[in-house]
Amino acid sequence: MEKRVSDSFTEQVHILSQGTLNGYNRLFGGQLMSWIDVVAAVVARRHSERNVTTAVVDMIQFQAPAYANDTILILGKIVYAGRTSMEIKVTVYVEELSGERKLINTAYVVMVALDDYEKPTLVPGLILETEEDKIEYENAKIRKARRLQYKTHQM
């Protein structure tokens, strides 16, 4: 069975308040990392129809700050499905009152689907519908190969 990228797309929205800010009144990076992990997990669960666990945060790139009372929009989509793992791209924006969006963060998270005994289990294949889907998929294969090469050199 295969699923489309759009089948598991996930969106989360927050308005920044005191509890999510650091000492400089900016969004606390750890809070954002937590939100990214949740969005990635929801995407992976929707795709695999299984519980999942985070295996790798391949890249998290802070590009701009967010401040108190900003609206934060977090978008997650699957970009790669292997045998038991899935790579999820999570993009984070500050959304202005006008609706204009400014990218503040991009992350790639690898999630693994778990069976009823918490062992890795097969995930559905991925149907690539758009040119962007195909490009993201090819880039994910490159990241996966780089991770495997790094792991081999660490042993």
Image (spheres, rainbow, N blue to C red):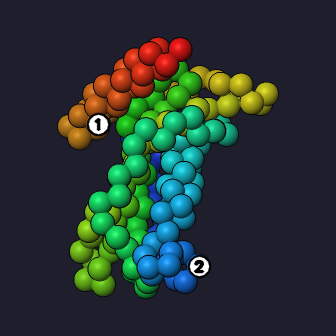
Q: What is the number of the mark on residue 67?
A: none
Which quadrant holds residue 144? Answer: top left
Q: Residue at x 53, y 61 (%)?
A: 30
Q: Which amino acid does label 1 sit on?
A: Glu
Element type at mark 1: helix
141 relative position to 39: left or right: left
154 relative position to 104: left or right: right
Q: Does residue 14 appear anywhere in the picture?
A: no
Residue in the foreground of this view, choosing between 26 and 8: 26
Q: Is residue 69 above or below residue 33?
A: below
Task: State which tag comes first along the sequence, 1 or 2.
Answer: 2
Q: Pointer 1 and pointer 2: residues touching (CB < 8 Å)? A: no
Question: Residue 138, position in %: x, y?
Answer: 28, 28
Q: In this view, does 144 lie above or below 71?
A: above
Q: Which residue is drawn at 40% across and 49% down?
A: 60
62 relative position to 45: left or right: left
Residue that mark 1 sits on: 136
**Mark 1: few/some/many CA within 10 Å (<14, 14-19, 20+):** some
Q: What residue type is labelled 2?
A: Gly
Q: Residue at x 40, y 57 (%)?
A: 75
Question: Residue 63, position in %: x, y?
Answer: 29, 60
For marks 1 and 2, give the one nearer the viewer.
2
Residue that mark 2 sits on: 19
Residue in the foreground of this view, choosing between 138 and 124: 138
Question: Residue 22, position in %: x, y?
Answer: 50, 75
Q: Residue furthest left?
A: 131
Q: Residue furthest right?
A: 117
Element type at mark 2: helix
